[in-house]
Each structure stands twice: as C-alpha cells, then as structure tokens.
Image (spheres, helix red, strand yellow):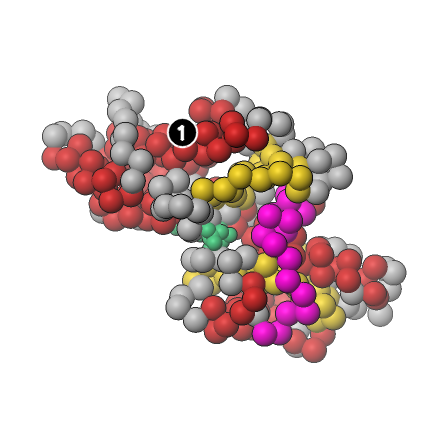
Amino acid sequence: MTFTAGVDVGSLCTKVVILNSEKEIKSYAILRSGAVYRGAAEAALDEALKKAGLDAKELSYIVSTGYGRSRVAYANNEITEISCHARGANFISAEIRTVIDIGGQDSKVIQLNEKGQAVRFVMNDKCAAGTGRFLEVMAGALEVDLDEMSEISFQAREDIEVSSMCTVFAESEVISLFASGYTKPEIAGAIYRSIARRVTGLVGQLGLKERVAMTGGVAKSKGMVRALEAKLGLTLIIPPEPQIIGALGAALFAYDKAPSCKNGNSS
Ligand SMILES: Nc1ncnc2c1ncn2[C@@H]1O[C@H](COP(=O)(O)OP(=O)(O)OP(=O)(O)O)[C@@H](O)[C@H]1O
Ligand SMILES: [Mg+2]
C-alpha cells in the first residue's frame, strides 16, 4: 500500500492529511502552528503518522500548502492554498463552484470551474476583521469560548449590530454594548453577522455561483454558518472536517504525483 500526505501550514493551525492508495483519508492531525512553523509541520506529520500506524518512509509523496508552505523541509512540492482548497472541496462535492475559506488570519473566496479548478479568487488579508482571529478576540471580550459563543448566539431575542469594521474598535464596541445591557447571546449574534457582511461583500466581488462550500476552522462554528447562510440566502456545504480541506487538496495533488498511486497499484 502506498500513502501520500498533504500539509497545510496555516497562520494559526497546521493540518496534515494522509491518503491511502484508494484515495481514502487514512488519518489527519490539526495542531496550532505556533511561532516555529517548521516544528509544527513536523509535529503534525508525526501525529498523523502515529494515528495511521505508519512510518514516514511509507509516504511516497508529500505536498505542502498554506502560509508557511515553504518551511516544510520534508515536502516534495509546494502548491498554493487557493488551488488546494479548490481541489479538496471538489473532492467533497463536484457541484461546488464557490469556496469560502475563513482561516485564522484571512478570508478568501474562490471560484471553481466545472473541472473543480480554481479560476478566480478574492481575499481579505489586510486586517483581522472577518477572520478566525477576530472571532477569538470577540469571544475573549465576551468571556466565552468559541463553542459557547456559537451556542448562545442561537438564544438571541433581538438582532443588534456591531458596526465597527476594525477588530480593535469592534472589541470596544462589544464591551460598551455589554455595559449598556445587551446580552451575550445578542452580541454573539451581532459578531457573526458582522463577519457574514464582510464575507458576503467578498463573494459579491466574484459573483455568487452555487453551490457554495465553506472551509477553514471557522466553518466549525454553527453560529457563523447560520449567519452566513442567512446573509447569502442559501444552504452552505460544510465538509465533515472543514479545517483539513486545504491539506486534503494538497494530499490529492501528492496522490497525482506518486506513480504507484496513479496506476492504482496497491502493493
Ligand atoms: N469550533 C470553532 N468555532 C469557531 N472557530 C473555530 C473553531 N475551531 C477552530 N476555529 C478557528 O479556526 C481558525 C483556524 O482555522 P484554520 O486552521 O483554517 O486557519 P489557518 O489555515 O491557520 O489560517 P489562514 O488560512 O488564515 O492562514 C482559528 O482562528 C480558530 O479560532
Ligand atoms: Mg488556511
């Protein structure tokens, strides 16, 4: 059996996916990237290998992607995260024409053609607003964790707005909303809607093409998904583990490059 791996070194988290020669996910790992990307890439690969019961020598080809992709010493090749998210999403469903990837540090919208290849994309990487980091700061201001923030947003009785587009101003706006008597559920709902507004603006730059999928760690937040679905007026495709879609795409590119996989040789 031949195995291939994809490594997505994101600005906040490093993800590894290992595929077997049947193109099935054998294992995956998600770790915080921390200050040393090279170390995170090694630790994440070790964890995925351990879960799969494999030795590094059994990997025939490895592709790296993401913000820190050039730091992965053991990778055979590097591919951009735009291509990898498109490839991973296409593997989940061939109907996907738009991918919204909200990671720790930026948000991207990618348009796919009928073959599942990325053809155009837009990106907000200028500031933290509309990213996972923004959500983390707001959860901190509300003194809840990310899962709690998602849960409580469903209990909001009133729709209020957080209007500041900047993380620092939005944080003080949240604190003053709280001080003026609004509840945590109402403020949590407002935070998700403010990200949804930003992301919908990005989608509008490309033109909405269905079906639409959401990838990246933030897609694990049900509160975020609900707010975005309401703003876009559609049902999003959310992969079972949305945070590993870039690494999955990288592993699929690795699969193409590994000769024994391509020939369907499972020895
Ligand atoms: N359950 C959750 N609810 C909300 N956010 C979550 C959840 N789990 C993870 N996240 C967020 O996902 C983000 C990390 O996602 P991801 O791994 O896709 O980012 P990244 O690839 O490191 O970043 P980038 O693509 O911007 O370089 C973090 O900001 C984290 O807070
Ligand atoms: Mg990412």
Residue indicated by mark 1: 197
**Mark 1 residue type:** Arg
Query: Residue 44 in magenta?
Result: no
Q: Is residue 238 visible?
A: no
Left or right of 116? Residue 238 is left
Magenta range = 73-89
Residue depicted at x 70% and y 42%: 117
Residue 209 lies, with reference to residue 146, above or below; the image says: above
Circle 1 packing at 10 Å, graded few (<14), some (14-19), many (20+), is some
Q: Where residue 166 sits: x, y (%)?
A: 29, 40
Task: Say which of 249 and 266 sits in front.
Answer: 249
Q: Where residue 33 sits: x, y (%)?
A: 44, 64
Split into 4 quadrants, where in the image is the C terminus? bottom right
Q: Is residue 13 visible?
A: yes
Quadrant of residue 96 within the rendered picture: top right
Quadrant of residue 141 within the rendered picture: top left
